[in-house]
Amino acid sequence: MFCELNAWEAGKGPRPLDRRLFLKCALASGAALGIGGAARPAAAIPSGAATGSEDDARFVVEAKFYEKLPNRKIKCKLCPRECAVGDKERGYCGVRENRGGTYYSLVHSRVAAAHVDPIEKKPLFHYLPGTNAFSLGTAGCNVNCKFCQNWDISQSRPEEVPAQYAPPQRVAELAKQYDCPTIAYTYSEPVVFAEYVMDAADAGHAAGVRSIVVSNGYMQEEPLKAAYGKMDAVKIDLKSFSESYYSKVVTGQLKPVLDSLVTLRKLGKWTEIVYLVLPTLNDSDQEFRGLAQWIKANLGPDVPLHFTQFHPEYLLKNLPITPVPTLERAKAIADAEGLHYVYIGNVPGHPAQNTYCPKCRKMLVERVGFTASKVLIRKNCCPFCQQPIPGVWHA
Amino acid sequence: MSTERSSRRDFLRASLPGAALLWTGGVAGSLATVEPVAAESGAAAGRSRVVVARDEQLRGAGASPASSIDSNRVLALLDRAMQALFGQEHPLAPVDAWRRLVHPGERVGLKVNTLGGRGISTNVQLVAAICERLQQAGVKPADIVIWDRDTGELERAGFHLAMGGDRVQCFGTDRVGYEEELSAYGSVGSLLSKILTQRCGALINLPVLKDHDGAGVTIALKNMYGVIHNPNKYHPNGCNPYVADVNMLPEIRSRMRLTICDATTAMYEGGPGYKPEHSWNANALLVSTDPVALDSTGWQMIERKRAEKGLKTLTAEKRAPSYIVTAADADHRLGTNDPRKISVVEV
């Protein structure tokens, strides 16, 4: 039931599903997947055009996290931006709109991309290895990373992206139907469709399907607890360890993301971190060391950290692919700082995509591409030296 | 004049085909080549000219503030403005002013602003008057497209959807979508409306004059946010430098010919959504080929109204439109914001 992946997808990107591919094969086979029950959106709507206003009503729900202000304005309390939004305007994310002083999400159940992915592709390496995740995303994002691989959905407004109606219970049904033990909220930025995440997670749990989220973590504490508190595992894209980078390249802030990681730790959520390494922009020894030290001090040495390879995309086509030696240098620094599970991602065949016991150094999980080809961990321990290996290894 | 009124009314009701035929007398023998716009508008001499044309009787003598504007008077007001802008050295017939701007066979886009609904959007009668003069200047009706981001918003502002046939076209980007390749300048990377890229050889910007809670004011430069797919990304920091960068996108800059700001109704506070309690009938048009000079002039009009109403200046409220300064800087050079280099001509 997998959509055929092109070479770029299979080999390089952690979240590489784009709208065109999605339309071509994912939700289009959506008839096959059953979302919306019928034809692909592109069949009825010109490429890039809006869904009709009648359809729009299905996707509109009142936002959960905002304050009403005088003169029909509102202040969004979902992410640290705290957009003050006037009547008939939208927040920075483009998917939340003030209508007469009430703030609405426009993307509940409005799926712009969906796919059945290996969980290793999120990537989550210590959570149900070898399983598939029913993965979905809507339009919109609360940052604007200049390297975004899915910018054509994340940086678009919902009416600009063909979409399918997929209410929470339908998502849970589809996950079960396709033998996915998890629903993954991913591709764009789940922060901006938090209400949908919460409802789909509830529907999934009621049906015996877990939920995981792939997020930038740029979220206020209350919604983080409310939405990601329903998650069974979390992957956070920590895009840099520098406020300057967050400001210039991400259009966000580092501090709230670090706060989110600490909150997730306190909530006891299984969390993994991805750090996309961009040549010249966030690849200094000092930054790698600071990052590793912070993780060890605040989250502990067992949090998996993935240094992944950048490929030129969106507004950063002028940079080269991250050299593998740079990734290996990052890993060496993090290893030396005492982190136990440091991976190299987007480099197929690299030995650092496998899991090794931090005590006896024997290989415990072998990965080929996005497939966990060998999982030797038994009862959450190394079978060779009985060292506990943190994670959720079996359903 | 009865024929003239009829043509605009017909256009307003149904975007009927063949409206150009109603003014054929003015078109014959008028196929002169287009002269460089800046030459007569003052930019070449190092000064930018902003015409502020007013008509206190725009809504008819004794009319209530809420009444609609008179289509004859708005045409006359438009003519005065265009003559003052393009004919300061040699008096021009109204249509000759337009011939300085466009030429027969050219496809002309009229980018209106319809976010504010009927309360404060680009006025339909004004747009009809512009269409009429464009046709007299030799532009075919079907080569004129009135457009904004969303067809629904156009209709709520009083425009009628018109796609296909030989009539003046009117629809939103939602009907045709955006280009698939990004256009980028400075801090901005956006997809552009296919209406701009595929339907407009020349662009005439028809904004309104409004306060904006984030940007300070929204007039000519910011109206270009309606051309891109991701305007929500460019509101932080008072839209600076984003507004200037959007206007630098080559597909926009190369097409821009003229701004006619509809200040028949304007807003000094509470924008961009329509707030009748903060609106006034300025009964004016601001016209210029320099959008920076026009925005500077419009900003001052809003400040004067704010002072009259006892409100703080936008600077005091920490929302002065700094993007206007950026638009004039050495990296952009979209026009001038230097009052010494702006000639404001009241007519």
Image (cartoon, coloured by chain):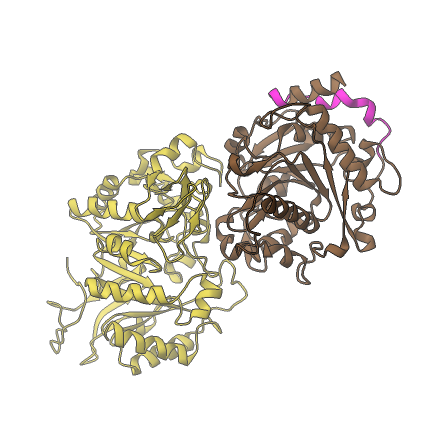
Chain colours: A yellow, B brown
State yes or no: residue B330 in magenta: no
Q: How many marks?
A: 0
Rendered location of residue B34, percent (x, y): 81, 41
Q: Is residue B85 left or right of residue A114?
A: right
Rendered location of residue A160, percent (x, y): 47, 42
Residue at screen point 34% across, 81% down: A333
Quadrant housing the C terminus of chain B:
top right
Residue at screen point 24% across, 44% down: A199
State yes or no: residue B17 in magenta: yes
What residue span does the magenta drawing correspond to?
Answer: B12-31
Visible residue check, residue B100: no
As drawn, B156 above or below A1: above
Rendered location of residue A84, percent (x, y): 43, 50
Quadrant housing the N terminus of chain B:
top right
Q: Is residue A336 left or right of residue B62?
A: left
As drawn, B300 above or below A165: below
Residue sticking out furthest to the right:
B90
Q: Is residue B270 left or right of residue B37?
A: left
As drawn, A123 above or below B233: below
- Magenta span: predominant SS is helix
Rendered location of residue A102, percent (x, y): 37, 40
Work out whether residue A17 or residue A103 is closer to the camera in this orientation and state it. Answer: A103
As drawn, B72 above or below A337: above
